């Protein structure tokens, strides 16, 4: 209960700021053996105004269903993961921003397998990996007949805390995009044996851009992100872990009405492990579709989205995202 109440309190106490056009959905890779690393979610090129605190609470659900066997390797991913992040960003000056992400991570057998199978059937998506038992928890990787990593006990706790900073390169006040250089350090505060962290410090650096346009007479925000993640000496599949992972994302936000916007974004990353299994050593990609609504009576902005893997790779089979951000009085969505 404290893990839910504390982020709510922090979010409500934070000084509200206006949401910016093109601000991305703050999403990371949520595959069980990859979410332990310090991949930063996209944030765009616009920084928090000086002296202001931006606070949001982001919840994500990832449903896993993947089984693969090769002569020397086998992998079973069956279960659900839940992520609750309190994200704080503070504007130090016109050019500098600092921040912290406080994560809570839980893994469970889940309850949504049957619902997701129906969703896939409705849209003619594949359920080929969902022929095993429903609503079980088994994250198991074996190599050469021996178990390398296994989690089959549900539980939750603090994840790896992430510290961030950003430097504004361009304001975007003219016809060009807003540009920011962003850095993030992930600290080993989570329990790696429970897949809540990697047991190491990771460092990420990215260049991010946000551009304001219009479509059908309504505001259109575009964003792009590109960078590299330097992995520390983690404790999970340590001898197979790679050193550097490139990553990128891009997307758009279209203001459909005064209080409703529509969003689409895609993300891709290089491989994290040396493995012939696509679900572990392959590149990752996903597509996110959703939207946001301003609840002016409550003074908050609510974003909700659905996440699907684009190809069969190291990405959860299905995910949902929910974010709540407090709005400044009189601000636009």
Image: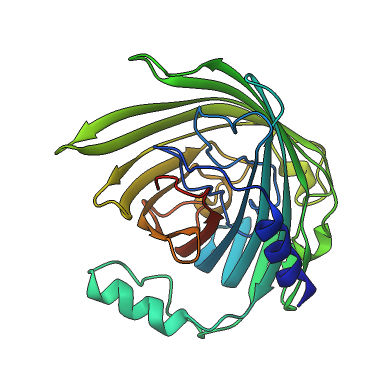
* Residue visible at 24% across and 75% down in the picture: 122
Most extreme residue toward the front is 330
| Farthest left residue in view | 216
Q: Position of residue 295 (x, y in %)?
A: 42, 63
Q: Is residue 9 above or below residue 99?
A: below
Front in this rendered view, residue 261 or 243: 261
Q: Viewer-proximal residue, 86 or 227? A: 86
Q: Quadrant of residue 69?
A: bottom right
Determine the image quadrant of residue 59. Answer: bottom right
Residue at (48% x, 43% y) in the render:
19
Locate residue 212, reporting x and y percent. Answer: 33, 28
Rendered position, 153 above or below 170: below
In this view of the protein, which residue sits in the foreground, 24 or 96?
96
Q: How is the image coloured?
A: rainbow
Q: Is residue 291 visible?
A: yes
Q: Is residue 16 above or below residue 22?
A: below
């Amino acid at each position: 209960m404290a893990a839910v109440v504390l982020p709510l309190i922090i979010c409500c106490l934070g000084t509200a700021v206006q949401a910016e056009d093109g601000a991305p959905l703050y999403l990371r890779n949520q595959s069980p053996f990859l979410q332990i690393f310090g991949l930063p979610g996209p944030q765009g090129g616009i920084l928090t105004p000086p002296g202001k605190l931006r606070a949001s609470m982001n919840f994500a659900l990832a449903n896993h269903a993947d089984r693969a066997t090769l002569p020397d390797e086998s992998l079973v991913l069956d279960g659900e993961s839940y992520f609750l992040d309190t994200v704080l960003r503070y504007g130090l000056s016109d050019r500098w921003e600092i921040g912290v992400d406080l994560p809570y991570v839980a893994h469970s057998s889940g309850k949504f397998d049957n619902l997701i199978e129906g969703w896939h059937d409705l849209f003619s998506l594949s359920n080929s990996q969902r022929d095993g038992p429903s609503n079980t928890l088994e994250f198991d990787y074996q190599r050469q007949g021996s178990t390398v990593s296994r989690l089959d006990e549900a539980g939750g706790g603090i994840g790896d805390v992430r510290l961030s900073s950003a430097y504004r390169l361009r304001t975007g006040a003219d016809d060009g995009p807003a540009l920011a250089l962003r850095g993030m350090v992930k600290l080993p505060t989570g329990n790696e044996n429970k897949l809540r962290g990697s047991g190491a410090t990771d460092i990420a650096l990215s260049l991010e851009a946000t551009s304001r346009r219009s479509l059908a007479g309504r505001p259109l925000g575009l964003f792009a992100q590109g960078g590299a993640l330097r992995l520390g000496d983690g404790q999970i599949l340590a001898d197979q872990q790679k050193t550097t992972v490139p990553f990128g994302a891009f997307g758009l936000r279209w203001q459909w009405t005064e209080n409703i916007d529509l969003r689409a974004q895609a993300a891709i990353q290089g491989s994290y492990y040396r493995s012939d299994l696509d679900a572990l050593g392959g590149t990752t990609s996903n597509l996110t579709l959703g939207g946001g609504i301003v609840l002016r009576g409550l003074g908050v902005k609510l974003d909700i989205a659905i996440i699907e893997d684009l190809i069969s790779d190291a990405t959860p089979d299905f995910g949902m995202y929910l974010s709540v951000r407090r709005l400044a009085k009189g601000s636009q969505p």
